[in-house]
Image (cartoon, grey):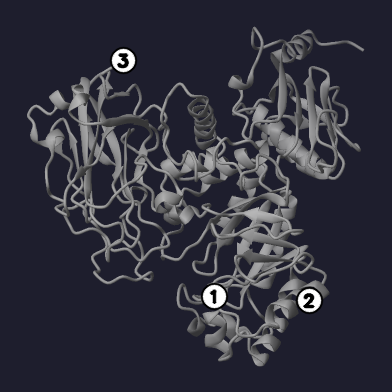
Amino acid sequence: MRLNLKSLILAVSLLMPAIAGALSLADYPLLPVPQAVEFGKSSFTVKSAAVTMPGWQATWEQELANAGIATSAKAKFTIKGEIVDAIDGAPEGNDEAYSLTISKKGIAVKATSEKGIYWALQTLLQLTRDSKNGRLPECSVIDWPAFPWRGFMMDTGRSFISIEELEREISVMSRFKLNVFHWHLTENQAWRLESKIFPMLNDSVNMERQPGQFYTLEQAAALVQYAKDHNILLVPEIDMPGHSAAFVRTFRHDMQSPEGMKILKLLVEEACNALDVPYFHIGTDEVPFTNPAFVPEMVDFVRSLGKKVISWNPGWNYKAGEIDLTHMWSYRGKPTPGVPAIDLRFHYINHFDVYADLIALYRSNVYGHKKAEDGIAGVEIALWNDRFVDDEPSLIAQNSVYPALLAVAERSWHGGGDEYFDKLGTNLLESETADFKAFADFEKRLLWHKDHTLDSIYIPYVKQSDVRWRITDPFPNNGNLSAVFPPETEEPAKSYIYNDSLFGTTDVNGAGIYLRHVWGDMVPALYKNPQPNHTAYAYTWVYAPHKMEVGLQAETQNYSRSESDIAPRQGKWDYRESKFWINGKEVEAPKWTATHTERTNEIALGNENFTARPVIPVTLNKGWNRVMIKLPVGKFQTYETRLVKWMFTFVFTTPDGKHAAPGLIYSPDKRM
């Protein structure tokens, strides 16, 4: 056999080291971070591989092709996988554990189940980074999840979400090793799952929002299969007996009545027969129970159909054996002895702002646990669409869905987390702490995936860990929100910026800062004991290397997607007389698109949140630019905004709003 010299040179070059010196995690944006990973000294390129992978052969071959690695049974570079009883170094009994070894000879995968085989693939794909030429590092990974239940709940009962978006969410979840998609299908506004037995349930006349939009049984079954193909468990939910106004409108019977229960059982049986899922969620939250037999009878009925049953907590009071799993949705929720619990407390991203709440979500543990134990099986984040948003991409962006998915993916897989929402809270304080460094590292990886893995999705999050502020102690305003105080009245105001002895201050990092969280003292913010009728000021200097045209993301009230709050009056940022100044010039408030004056969830959110409007164009001077923000607050609940967020968002971006403005330095002390 004659060997072509050109082919020989090419074959050798494909296996030549590409990087001098040892590689490390800093070279690869792995998210979530594996439990243990060791890198070699070089990377190399693979053009063709022979794949042997039980259960996932086709999936591996397709994904490898996307990464620039063709598959051929004759290839010398082999990729082999096998199911083993245990992984050395991983906890016993973890059915998602895997090991992944990459060398110049091939790739070896071991896993305790096919689940682990799939997760190994996701890690391998992240190790290819964004090069589509099959470049891989020498490395060894031993990995397993800290929690077996790592989920996301989407409420499609209130607001219909397209199948295309649901599939995208499932696909992204699988990329980052989340494994449960909780599908909330029914609500007061509409019953979104088709019934062929009772088609009038899906009739437009019985829907209060987005009439006529629902999922056929065939679409729902296909989504179940799509989730399975992505290693994700789909959990359908029909909420009962509360949140059921659509049911009552249709049948004129309460679910807890004898007639209502007969109808409901037919609907549940129809859904269970159509959807090949092991779990079925029955709700039971936020409702008075008028029929004490309702919940036990429905649990027994669902179990008779071969499904395990999940219920909200607080809800019906179960004892061990009476339910298979509970979701703790409120801070009042507590694990039921003998029943696995999933933590959703303070995990409602419809209340989250883009920046500060992501910090709390990332740094949290799960019900005080750093791994699954004592009946705590895992965690979900949830998106409740109480307030109508009539544009789907805007709804996803305003709720910061994809950054939140990545944050909960990291924490629920890797485990750990030093503080929950009720301890450190939402703000980054000292830049040299381990907590700050951990978040900054996570943020770096998140932003890499935003620009590569998720580049087709509008994600308004930009780098915030280098944005530094100094915030005054609050001045009492006695209810006069227009009152002015020394940081504003002295000229030049910079004399106060440099003389902190004139009033107390606190330094904090981030593009979104809570002075008082929307949930009050349950989630710590900057002030330990915030009081109504006070005014604060935030200030910093921003150094620009040259005169720059930038964008500005700014707001002083992040509007929850679960509140019927009213947009500000024209010319005002909020109902509190908040103001922004850049180099002494006041920044005008946007022109608000919503003009109604009555509270309602059915008039769509307009451009109240910065995520729903273009960034504000700003010119920064070369050198230091002064930024000051006035933040008055009156009562913490008002007619216009039921849950006042004493907060602000402020960060300079590129003119298109896609990235943080390059080269800027934020420093209250003008330190380079």
**Dots 3, 2 in contact, CB < 8 A:** no
Q: Position of residue 306 (x, y in %)?
A: 83, 70
Describe residue 468's horizontal placement relative to residue 143 as left or right: left
Describe residue 147's horizontal placement relative to residue 457 as left or right: right
Describe residue 153's horizontal placement relative to residue 537 as left or right: right
Q: Position of residue 103 (x, y in %)?
A: 79, 19
Mark toward the start of the polypeptide (2 vs 1): 1
Residue named by callout 3: 672
Tag 3, which secondary structure?
Answer: loop
Q: Residue at horizontal 29%, vertical 36%?
A: 551
Q: CA distance from mark 3 to mark 1?
A: 55 Å
Describe residue 510's horizontal placement relative to residue 99 as left or right: left
The residue lying toward the viewer, choosing from 210 and 233, is 233
- Say which mark, if any, is on residue 381: none
Residue named by callout 2: 300
Q: CA distance from mark 2 to mark 1?
A: 21 Å
Nearest to viewer (mark 2 / mark 1): 2
- Say which mark, if any, is on residue 243: 1
Q: Position of residue 285 (x, y in %)?
A: 58, 70
Tag 2, which secondary structure?
Answer: helix
Q: Amino acid at mark 1?
A: His
Q: Amino acid at mark 3?
A: Met
